[in-house]
Image: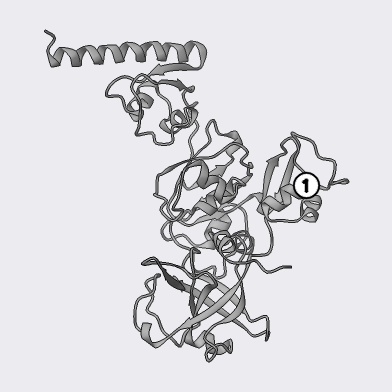
Amino acid sequence: MTTAPSRGLRARALRAAVMLVAAYSILALGTADYTVQPGDTLSEIARDLDVEAASLAAVNKLVDPHLLVVGRTLVVPPPPRGETTDASSVAVNPADAPARLHRVAAGEYLSTIARAYGLPTSALAAANQIDEPDLLAVGQLLVIPDGALTTATTVHVVRQGEYLGAIARTYNSTVAALRSLNAIADPHHIRPGQRLRVGGGGGRRIVVDRGETVSGIAAEAGTTVAAIVAANELGDPGRIDAGDVLVVPVPAEGATVACEASWYGDYFAGRPTASGEIFDTSLMTAASHFVPLPTWVTVTRPDTGQTVHVKINDRGPFHMVDGEWEPHPQRCIDLSEAAAAALGARELGHVPVQVAFPPLTPEVDRLLGLYSNPSS
């Protein structure tokens, strides 16, 4: 009868032999296969074969690297060639990466990740079977589906104590350029972990697929045919071929959401908002869904032309559906009492409005999906 210790020794010996064969194959051929053994973890396999665990997961399309199946054959990529990367400054270029994986960083949203790869948020959610886009975890690995647009944008992750002027000097840029690229209203308020675009001219570099048109690319990227034509000096926008490389400019204008605005007042005065700030009915603030807190927006009544500029620092408005609080189907913004009064809406209770968001506001596409977009 074989004892448990001897079985363990035999398993370790078998694993060592398999590792030795795999390592030799990598040296000789540049790649190898490895069959998962009992007790294996992805990090141990990567360590023993001197490859990146993320690359190993990506090459094998492992959505959850913690779930390895014994007996599965993994393709082992070549080991890294010694390049070093500062985690605070990453060249985001999915086309150059050996894998279509993205590791979620602090402060990232599903929509900002999708935009970085030129994908609709819905496509990224579907590829990763994500039903709740708000429940991303830092460090989570996302599969980037085929067809992602490539980018030539450099991203800087803000460190504790950094300010915009120093970051601009680091990248031979200017504060004005960084504010424009990142839609920063107040240059004195950037937060640790915030991801800033610091290069690439505010555009994306894409490879044209078979059957694509300039108008289709413009519609998917949220820009215009004229902007793409100008950025690429296209003589004939109808003449693009599969394999052509185009620069797709980031749209200069932010999104505008058409809905109703309501307001809230004394009952909530003195209570913490979703951002942690204390609600004050006399301040020009508002509640809305999904977008980062705070986000400054301009709210306009199309019937009167009255406009207010408010800070979104809370979540709402909601209504009850089957015992659960859900976003209100008509109202996308809940104004403070002071903001409602300035808009002439205090006595009316709720009025039709257009809410203009800054360019590149994360998650605003989810608002557009819930509420009608005004015709241009």
Q: Position of residue 332 (x, y in %)?
A: 53, 71
Q: What's the residue at 24%, 15% (across, down)?
A: 11
Q: Position of residue 157 (x, y in %)?
A: 48, 52
Q: Taking 1 as reference, is 150 above or below it? A: below
Q: Position of residue 262 (x, y in %)?
A: 51, 80
The answer to whether one can see residue 314 in this image is no
Side (left or right) of 122 relative to 49: right
Q: Which quarter of the figure is the N terminus placed in?
A: top left
Side (left or right) of 329 relative to 5: right
Q: Which quarter of the figure is the C terminus placed in?
A: bottom right
Q: What's the residue at 55%, 78% (across, down)?
A: 261
Residue pushed farthest bottom? 347
Q: Which of the 4 image quadrants contains residue 371?
A: bottom right
Q: Taking 357 as reference, is 363 above or below it? A: above
Q: Position of residue 63 (x, y in %)?
A: 43, 36
Residue pushed farthest top? 1
Work out whether residue 258 or residue 319 is closer to the camera in this orientation and state it.
Answer: 319
Q: Taking 43 as reference, is 262 above or below it? A: below
Q: Which of the 4 image quadrants contains residue 56?
A: top left
Give the amino acid at mark 1. Answer: Val
The answer to whether one can see residue 82 in this image is yes
Q: Which of the 4 image quadrants contains residue 145?
A: top right
Q: How many marks?
A: 1
Residue pushed farthest right? 235
- Secondary structure category for the residue under label 1: helix
Q: Taking 141 as reference, is 34 above or below it? A: above
Side (left or right) of 308 relative to 41: right
Q: According to the image, label 1 marks what residue?
A: 214
The type of colouring in the image is one colour
Mark 1 surroundings: few (<14), some (14-19) or many (≥20) residues within 10 A: many
